[in-house]
Image (cartoon, grey):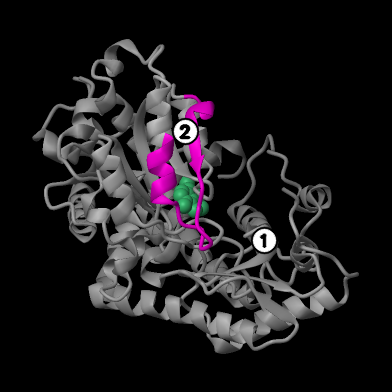
Amino acid sequence: MSGPESLLPSSRARRAAEMEELLAAVAALGRDLLAREEELPGGAARDPGQLAAALDLALPDAGRPLAEVMARLRAVLLATPSSSSWRFVNQLFAGREPAATAAAMLTPLVNISMYTFKAGGAQILVERELLHRMCAAAGFTAGEGAFTPGGSFANFLALVLARNEALPGARETGVAGARLVAYTSAEGHYSVPKNAGLAGIGRANVRAIAVDGRGRMLPEALAAAIAADRAAGLRPFFVNATAGTTVRGAFDPLGELGDVARAAGLWFHVDAAFGGSLLLSPEHRRLLAGSERADSLAWDPHKMMGVPLQSSVLLLARRGLLARNLDESADYLFQADPDELNPGRRSLQCGRPNDALKLWAAWQRLGSQGWVARLGRQMALARRAAELIRSDPELRLAEEPPSLNVCFEVRGRASDAVCDRLDRDGLLKIGHGIVAGRRTIRLVCSNADLGDADLAEILAEIKAAARALPPGDNAVAG
Ligand SMILES: Cc1ncc(COP(=O)(O)O)c(C=O)c1O
């Protein structure tokens, strides 16, 4: 049969045959994509207008044959940067754990939603196992947790839970006139003010607390700000400490900040979206010392652990808060099994994709010992990059890397211009950020597959791009 009627889902056998054909095509296309990673697929595709025209993205009236659909998918994917290329060091995530990628590719084949055991079956148990293990790593021995659609959202959920704890009744009657105040560092993630704007706190009621010379929030400045707000009749309620800041990879002193927060009776949240994975490393978890006394902690395995986006959790020190703040009766949905097996009672979403299986698969492959080795390798890579930069007269290291972020400049060249040029030429995806009043190039060593030769090649590309540019300065006004 040909024509539109052949596309109707009228025959299960035909659908199955189509799926079978696609599985083989997916494997072949996957192999092609991997083979192109060396050259940063899509690296030079910088003009959105030209790219849209070349790809012919319009949605057709008449369906296309499968082979043509696959050819079009191939063209789009080859025009997309791969974050597993050694040339992609632009983000806090890069590289992949193969078993996690395989699990992520397979997950939609069952396409369940994670609200009930009835709908999700074994996947619910996989998620429970992970949350249990991750709570233990955070030191939350009587804790609970939830997978969230990203670290920004985990931070949002923490803020809302803290708000409702601070204002009993807020869930029912709202927060009008509450005059709540939250605290984060001047180098904390932008999701904190954004979330305050959504949670009825107000962006103007988030204080950006000063940091020390290494980008860490100053406990005495936090204590002073809390005292000043109290004296002004406001209601401090939430401290967000960061374990792994976005630009510098710095770790706030969690023990001291937690002491300040607790002494003032405030909720203490740790945004460990980036650095939380280091909880699995006996050597590096000292960076998060004090997290075990927090009220909540956000952790993104999709950043340091090579798990495909999104894989994020919010962990809570005390059980019961999620259900207390998120449960709604929905008798059309929660019809079987105890609440404990129905995570929909503890999540904001109704339909929710399975973000757990890919992390579980990677953990099966590596074991806890494998994570230790992987994280150690990433940290060593950052130290090695710093050594190479320090010993190169053309480069200036901004600071010893606190974790995976290596911030530096090419002497006499504007960091933003260098990064833009590398992007335009399709050579390297790398970003820039401000460290101690200067704009620096930020090399993030998240890709555990990088080696010394790759680092040398990355630095060589950066210097070559910089030499082709006119002199420039990196001092940032203000
Ligand atoms: C410190 C920190 N917190 C939170 C986030 C937000 O995480 P996500 O991108 O998963 O929303 C980021 C993202 O880079 C981050 O660096």
Q: Which residue is situated farthest in the left direction here? A: 338
Tell me the CA gap for discs 1 and 2.
24 Å
The range drawn in magenta is 202-225
Q: Image point 41% across, 70% down: which residue?
A: 97
Drawn side of residue 175 relative to residue 51, left or right: left
Q: Is residue 72 above or below residue 470?
A: above
Label 1 residue near ligand 1, CB within 8 Å: no
Q: Image point 60% across, 65% down: which residue?
A: 82
Q: Residue 128: give x, y in percent of width and height.
A: 19, 50
Q: Nearer the viewer, residue 165 or 106?
A: 165
Residue 162 numbered mark, or none: none
What type is the residue that disc 2 sits on?
Answer: Asn
Labels 1 & 2 near each other (Cβ < 8 A):
no
Q: Residue 253: give x, y in percent of width and height.
A: 36, 57
Q: Earlier in the sequence, mark 1 or mark 2?
A: 2
Residue neighbourhood size for the residue with mark 1, other residues' Cα within 10 Å, grouped as few (<14), some (14–19), many (≥20): many
Q: Nearer the viewer, residue 200 or 343?
A: 200
Q: Is residue 389 above or below residue 279?
A: below
Q: Determine if residue 209 is in view.
A: yes
Residue neighbourhood size for the residue with mark 2, other residues' Cα within 10 Å, grouped as few (<14), some (14–19), many (≥20): many
Drawn side of residue 204 relative to residue 433, left or right: left
**Residue that badge 1 annotates:** 432
SS at circle 1? strand
Q: Residue 159: give x, y in percent of width and height.
A: 36, 34
What type is the residue that disc 1 sits on?
Answer: His
Q: Which residue is situated farthest in the right direction here? A: 470
SS at circle 2? helix
Q: Image point 48% across, 66% down: which residue?
A: 24
Residue 195 numbered mark, or none: 2
Q: Determine if residue 105 is in view.
A: no
